[in-house]
Image: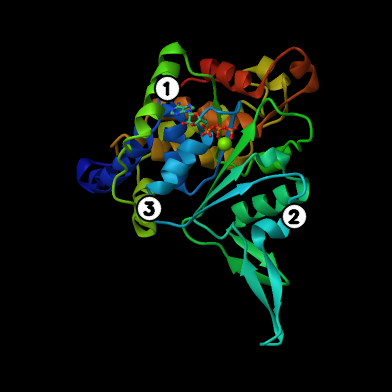
C-alpha cells in the first residue's frame, strides 16, 4: 500500500465524471449497471457490448452519454448489406486534383454507437473490430489514426437469430465488457411511462459537456488508482482458474477456451475505473468481483458438453467467484 502522502486524490477530476454519470442516469429508470459500465469503458478507453431484447433503453443510454460529451458522435445501424467501407471510409477520386482522397467513414468519431452489430456481415465486423483494437484504419495502403478518445458502444439483440452473424470469440475479446440488460419490473415500467410522458414537456438536465481533454485527463488519473498486490493476485488467480486444473477442476473441465491475458488486464483496468467512479483512489475486492462476470464471461467458451448441460460462460464465472476468494 502507498502511504497517504504519495497517493493522488482523484476527487477533483472525479467530480465532472460523477456529474456526467449522474446526468446519464437521470434520463433512465434503473439501468445503473449499464450506466456504470458505459462510464468505466469511457474511463479506461475500452469498448462496450450491450446485449438485450429490443426496447430496453440501450440506444437511449448511449445517446445520453453522447449528449454529455463535447466529442463527436456517430451512429451506425448495421444491416446485412453493409460494406466495410461504409464504416471506415472510402477513397474518392477528385478529378480537379487528379488524385484519390480518403473520405472518413462514421467510425472516425469519438463515441460510435454501433446498433445491432450481429446483423453486420463478418467482413464489416472484422473491419470494425480491427479499428477498435488498433485505433486506426488502413485504406489504400495508408493508415489513418482514429480520434482520441475513441469508444465503441455496440448493441446486439439477444432474441434475433435469423439473418444474424454471431461475433466470433476472438473478436468478442476486443470488448472490455459485455453487459446484459433485462426486462424492468412493474414499478420501473410504470416509472418509465411517467418519465417519457414528462419528457414531452420538460427535458432532464445534462451537465456541461465534458471535453476530450477532460476525459483523457480522467483516464490518466484512473491509471494511477492503487491496485494492491493482493488484489492483482486475486485477478490472476481468477483468470488462471479458467486454465488450470486447480482450484476448481470441475469448472476447468467445462471450459474449452480459457481467458487470455487481455482479460486479466481488462479486469484490472475496469476495477480501477470503478474505484475512481466511486471517488476512491484504491480498488477493492468488491470492484473486481462485481465486474468479473461482465469482463471475463465473453472471453471464455464452455465445452459443447457443458453447454449441452445448460452451463453458460457467465454461470461458470459466477461459480468461480465462489471458489476463488480474495486473500
Ligand atoms: N429504463 C428505461 N428508462 C427510460 N426509458 C426507457 C427505459 N427502458 C425503455 N425506455 C424507453 O423505451 C424506448 C426504447 O428505448 P431504446 O430505443 O433505447 O431501446 P433499445 O434497447 O435501443 O431497443 P432496440 O434493441 O430495439 O434498438 C425509449 O422510448 C425509451 O425512452
Ligand atoms: Mg436501439
Is 79 situated above or below 307? below
Q: Is residue 238 left or right of residue 227?
A: right
Report if residue 137 is visible in the image.
Answer: yes
Q: Which of the 4 image quadrants contains residue 53?
A: top right
Alpha carbons under labels 3 and 1: distance apart: 33 Å
Locate residue 291, reporting x and y percent.
Answer: 48, 29
Q: Quadrant of the N terminus?
A: top left
211 or 27: which is nearer to us? 27
- For disc 1, the marked residue is 193
Assign a secondary structure to mark 3.
Answer: helix
Assign a secondary structure to mark 2.
Answer: loop
- For disc 3, the marked residue is 215
Is 274 situated above or below 81? above
Is 6 situated above or below 240? below
Q: What residue lies at 37% left-to-right and 33% top-to-bottom?
A: 199
Label 3, ligand 1: CB separation under 8 Å: no
First of labels 3, 1 by sequence position: 1
60 or 30: which is nearer to us? 60
Alpha carbons under labels 2 and 3: distance apart: 31 Å
Locate residue 91, reporting x and y percent.
Answer: 70, 71
Q: Which mark is residue 83?
A: 2
Amino acid at each position: 500500500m502507498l502511504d497517504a502522502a504519495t497517493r493522488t486524490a482523484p476527487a477533483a477530476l472525479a467530480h465532472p465524471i460523477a456529474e456526467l454519470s449522474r446526468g446519464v442516469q437521470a434520463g433512465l429508470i434503473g439501468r445503473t449497471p449499464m450506466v456504470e459500465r458505459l462510464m468505466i469503458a469511457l474511463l479506461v478507453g475500452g469498448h462496450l457490448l450491450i446485449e438485450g431484447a429490443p426496447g430496453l433503453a440501450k440506444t437511449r443510454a448511449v445517446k445520453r452519454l453522447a449528449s454529455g460529451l463535447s466529442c463527436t458522435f456517430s451512429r451506425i445501424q448495421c444491416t446485412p448489406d453493409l460494406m466495410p467501407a461504409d464504416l471506415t471510409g472510402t477513397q474518392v477520386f477528385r478529378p480537379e486534383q487528379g488524385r484519390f482522397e480518403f473520405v472518413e467513414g462514421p467510425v472516425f468519431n469519438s463515441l460510435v454507437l454501433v446498433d445491432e452489430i450481429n446483423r453486420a456481415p463478418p467482413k464489416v465486423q472484422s473491419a470494425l473490430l480491427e479499428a477498435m483494437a488498433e485505433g486506426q484504419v488502413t485504406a489504400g495502403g495508408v493508415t489513418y489514426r482514429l480520434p482520441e478518445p475513441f469508444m465503441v458502444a455496440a448493441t446486439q439483440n439477444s432474441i434475433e437469430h435469423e439473418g444474424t452473424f454471431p461475433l466470433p470469440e476472438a473478436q468478442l475479446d476486443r470488448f472490455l465488457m459485455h453487459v446484459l440488460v433485462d426486462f424492468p419490473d412493474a414499478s420501473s415500467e410504470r416509472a418509465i411511462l411517467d418519465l417519457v410522458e414528462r419528457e414531452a414537456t420538460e427535458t432532464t438536465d445534462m451537465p456541461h459537456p465534458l471535453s476530450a481533454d477532460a476525459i483523457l485527463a480522467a483516464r490518466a488519473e484512473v491509471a494511477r488508482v492503487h491496485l494492491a498486490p493482493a488484489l492483482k493476485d486475486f485477478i490472476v488467480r481468477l483468470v488462471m482458474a479458467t486454465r488450470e486444473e486447480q482450484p476448481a477442476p470441475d469448472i476447468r473441465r467445462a471450459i474449452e477456451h480459457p481467458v487470455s491475458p487481455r482479460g486479466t488486464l481488462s479486469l484490472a483496468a475496469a476495477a480501477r475505473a470503478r474505484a475512481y467512479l466511486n471517488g476512491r483512489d484504491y480498488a477493492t475486492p468488491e470492484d473486481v468481483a462485481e465486474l468479473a462476470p461482465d469482463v471475463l464471461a465473453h472471453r471464455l467458451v464452455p465445452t459443447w458438453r457443458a453447454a449441452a448441460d445448460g452451463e453458460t460462460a457467465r454461470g461458470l464465472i459466477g461459480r468461480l467467484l465462489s471458489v476463488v476468494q480474495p486473500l
